[in-house]
Amino acid sequence: MASFFTGSHSSRQQQRILLKFNMATSNEKSSRDNEPPIIDLTQTEAEIIPLIASACSKWGFFQIINHDVSPELVQRFKAESQNFFD
């Protein structure tokens, strides 16, 4: 993951990015270990890019929040996604 942190990222920004995207890379299991990553679009582009890269390489997909898509459409998508995997 260190390769994602280049340029003007401060150490504090790096820590925030890593904390926001705490995947199943630690030895401790959490309730989020079995859930895909969630990426919040209210973050800066510099914060979002490494999150997307990591999510794609570790999971192959991710969920985006705060994207201005209607809640009804999101709910329909979630239901159809669940139906696909059931």
Image: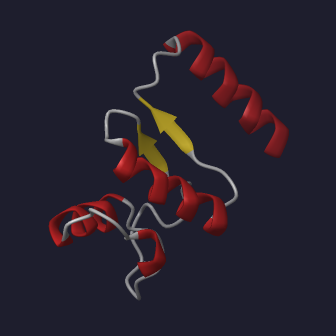
**Could you tell me residue 32's position as x and y percent?**
44, 61
Q: Residue at x 55, y 41 (%)?
A: 63
The residue lying furthest to the bottom in this view is 27
Q: Quadrant of the C terminus?
A: top right
Q: Can residue 86 be seen at all in this image of the molecule?
A: no
Taking the image as shown, residue 7 lies to the left or right of residue 53, namely left
Give the image quarter of residue 82: top right
The image quadrant of residue 53 is: bottom right
- Residue occupying the point 41% across, 88% down: 27
Q: Residue furthest front?
A: 7
Residue extending furthest left?
Answer: 12
Closer to us: 70 or 42: 42
Figure quadrant of residue 34? bottom right
The image shows residue 20 at horizontal and vertical percentages of 32, 58
Picture coordinates of residue 11, whole percent (x, y): 19, 72
Q: Position of residue 42 (x, y in %)?
A: 32, 33
Residue 48 seen: yes
- Left or right for 86, reference 14: right
Left or right of 16, for residue 39: right
Question: On screen, 59 above or below 61?
Answer: below
Q: Residue at 47%, 52% (x, y): give it.
A: 49
- 70 or 8, which lies in front? 8
Q: Residue drawn at (46%, 16%), measured in percent from left and top?
A: 68
Q: Total number of numbered labels?
A: 0
Q: How is the image coloured?
A: secondary structure
